[in-house]
């Protein structure tokens, strides 16, 4: 039986997103402009417009299980293209927060691992340390030589640095992570 028919309040998920980020997915007219402009769409399990449709149809589990919300790079191309002025990038971010809060991880564990290493890099340095990110990710996913041939090219172009380039004042970054922790902490049992 379709998921939508098993739910009492068919607007529950749409209202949850609305309360979280102030974006009303019911305004989406399914024009597809967000999906056609998304630079990551070819890798996504579902197109951005499909995620909006899942929200409209109260298909919460389907939306939260999609790798789309983790692959989204928050480039905001979709947001600026939307004729209904819906902040799709913001919605993707809100869905990731719900996942973190409820412990819902993407089916492909590599995505979760990349996300964790990426955020730890920001937390420690205030910005991404690319070389450390690649090395940790490759080791954690048991593919130590992945993209190894690209390393010398990127060093040559000055795109990779041997040591992390830390921001001067890490305190605001730490404060932001600390604030985010309170949001994604599991909900107390009611
Ligand atoms: S913000 Fe995310 S969903 Fe939107 S275009 Fe960029 S990558 Fe795609
Ligand atoms: S661009 Fe806006 S209205 Fe069009 S499908 Fe995407 S979210 Fe819906």
Image (cartoon, rainbow, N blue to C red):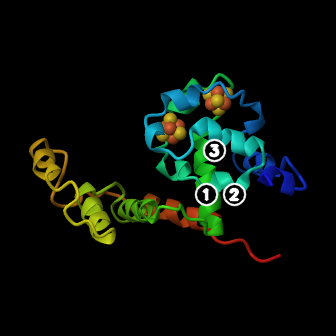
Q: What separation in Å lies between label 3 and label 1 (alpha carbons)?
A: 15 Å
Of pointers 3 and 2, the one earlier in the residue sequence: 2
The image shows residue 154 at horizontal and vertical percentages of 15, 46
SS assignment at label 2 = helix
Is mark 2 in CB contact (under 8 Å) with mark 1?
yes
Say which residue label 1 marks. 65
Q: Badge 2: few (under 14), some or many (20 or more) residues near its Cα, within 10 Å?
A: few
Q: Badge 3: few (under 14), some or many (20 or more) residues near its Cα, within 10 Å?
A: many
Judge whether residue 85 can be spotted in this image. Answer: no
Say which residue label 2 marks. 61
Q: What separation in Å lies between label 2 and label 1 (alpha carbons)?
A: 6 Å
Q: Badge 1: few (under 14), some or many (20 or more) residues near its Cα, within 10 Å?
A: some
**Residue at (58% x, 49% y) in the render:** 93
Of pointers 3 and 1, the one earlier in the residue sequence: 1
Nearest the viewer among 80 and 137 is 137
The image shows residue 183 at horizontal and vertical percentages of 64, 63
Mark 2 and ligand 1: say if the CB distance to the nearest ligand atom is below 8 Å: no
Quadrant location of the N terminus in the rendered image: bottom right
Is mark 3 in CB contact (under 8 Å) with mark 1?
no
Is 118 left, or right, of 132 in this rendering?
right
The image shows residue 75 at horizontal and vertical percentages of 46, 38
**Residue at (72% x, 51% y) in the render:** 20
| Above or below, 24 relative to 20 | above
| Above or below, 109 relative to 189 | above
Say which residue label 3 marks. 91
The image shows residue 103 at horizontal and vertical percentages of 61, 69
Is 28 left, or right, of 74 in this rendering?
right
Q: Quadrant of residue 136?
A: bottom left
Q: Please, which residue is most extreme toward the bottom here?
A: 189
**Residue at (83% x, 51% y) in the render:** 12
SS assignment at label 3 = helix
């Amino acid at each position: 039986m379709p998921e939508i028919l098993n739910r009492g309040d068919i607007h529950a998920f749409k209202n949850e997103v609305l309360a979280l980020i102030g974006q009303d997915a019911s305004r989406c007219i399914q024009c597809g402009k967000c999906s056609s402009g998304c630079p990551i769409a070819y890798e996504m399990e579902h197109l951005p417009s499909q995620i909006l449709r899942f929200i409209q149809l109260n298909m919460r589990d389907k939306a939260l299980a999609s790798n789309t919300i983790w692959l989204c790079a928050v480039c905001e191309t979709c947001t600026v293209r939307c004729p209904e002025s819906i902040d799709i990038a913001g919605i993707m971010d809100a869905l990731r927060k719900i996942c973190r809060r409820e412990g819902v991880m993407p089916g492909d564990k590599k995505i979760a691992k990349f996300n964790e290493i990426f955020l730890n890099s920001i937390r420690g340095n205030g910005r991404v340390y690319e070389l450390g990110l690649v090395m940790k990710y490759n080791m954690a996913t048991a593919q130590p030589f992945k993209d190894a041939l690209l390393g010398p090219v990127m060093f040559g172009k000055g795109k990779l640095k041997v040591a992390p380039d830390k921001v001067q004042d890490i305190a605001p970054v730490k404060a932001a992570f600390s604030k985010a922790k309170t949001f994604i902490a599991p909900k107390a049992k009611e």
